[in-house]
């Protein structure tokens, strides 16, 4: 029995929509469970990390153990905290009808000097331009973040987090 081959374009579209459907299902379930994969890439400590539906990232460690070819785990934690806090703040601001003209965050973490050398304190420096935003209402939003941001919630017992901001006119 001879099997008919599917034309390349149809095969591509079938694969594309299959992946889209799987990714959509994974995204709708992200409120329940998250999944990440990690593969060792070299004979040192370079990993390729991926979360379903996203591009892979390089994760490495500093010399002499690693080659410094990717993010360190603590750098990823800083990015996670920054994006979590930023997401919560932007949602709050937009719910209040604020228009965001500029928003950026720089995050710095100070490591403990003894093992484990986790982050002892983290400083976030937020620059924001949102017409009509006053410091008092932004302070209230920041005060409510601990109960909203899951990344902050996970580290709050051992890591001090301080948020500094500048509201542009």
Image (cartoon, rainbow, N blue to C red):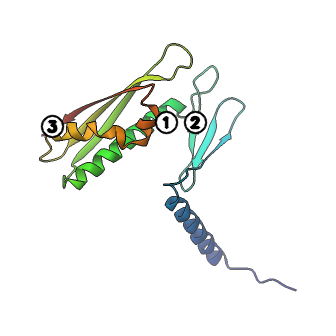
Q: Which residue is mark 1?
A: 76
Depth check, front residue: 64 or 28 = 28
x%, y% of residue 149? 38, 42
Disc on res. 136? 3
Residue 8 tag number: none
Which one is earlier in the sequence, the residue at label 1 or at label 2?
A: 2
Q: Residue sitting at 67 percent across and 79 percent down?
A: 7
Instruction: Check the image and report above or below for 16 versus 128.
Output: below
The answer to whether residue 72 is seen in the rendering is: no
Place residue 129 in its image quadrant: top left
Q: Distance between the Cα atoms at labels 2 and 3?
A: 39 Å
Depth-wise, is mark 2 or mark 3 nearer the camera? 3
The location of residue 160, given as percent across then percent down, is: 38, 25
How many angstroms separate mark 1 from mark 3 (CA)? 31 Å
Camera-nearest residue between 28 and 36: 28
Up-down relation of residue 14 to residue 69 (above or below):
below
For label 2, the residue is: 59
User: Reading the chain from its start, which is encountered first: label 1 or label 3?
Assistant: 1
Residue sitting at the far top: 114
Residue shown at 58% from the left, 36% from the top = 59
Please indicate whether residue 17 sits to the left or right of residue 31 in the image.
right
Q: Quadrant of the C terminus?
A: top left
Q: What residue lies at 57% left-to-right and 28% top-to-bottom?
A: 68
In this rendering, the count of numbered labels is 3
Q: Position of residue 111 (x, y in %)?
A: 46, 20
Res. 155 image quadrant: top left
């Amino acid at each position: 029995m001879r099997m008919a081959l599917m034309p390349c374009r149809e095969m591509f579209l079938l694969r594309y929509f299959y992946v889209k459907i799987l990714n959509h299902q994974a995204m709708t379930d992200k409120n329940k469970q998250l999944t990440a994969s990690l593969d060792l890439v070299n004979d040192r400590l370079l990993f390729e990390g991926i979360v379903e539906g996203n591009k892979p990232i390089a994760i490495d460690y500093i010399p002499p153990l690693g080659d410094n070819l990717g993010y360190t785990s603590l750098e990823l934690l800083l990015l996670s905290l920054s994006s979590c806090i930023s997401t919560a703040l932007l949602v709050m601001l937009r719910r209040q009808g604020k228009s965001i003209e500029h928003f950026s965050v720089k995050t710095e973490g100070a490591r403990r000097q003894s093992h484990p050398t986790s982050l002892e304190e983290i400083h976030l420096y937020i620059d924001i331009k949102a017409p009509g935003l006053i410091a008092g209402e932004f302070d209230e939003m920041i005060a409510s973040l601990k109960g909203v941001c899951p990344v902050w919630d996970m580290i709050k017992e051992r890591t001090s987090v301080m948020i500094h901001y500048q509201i542009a006119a």
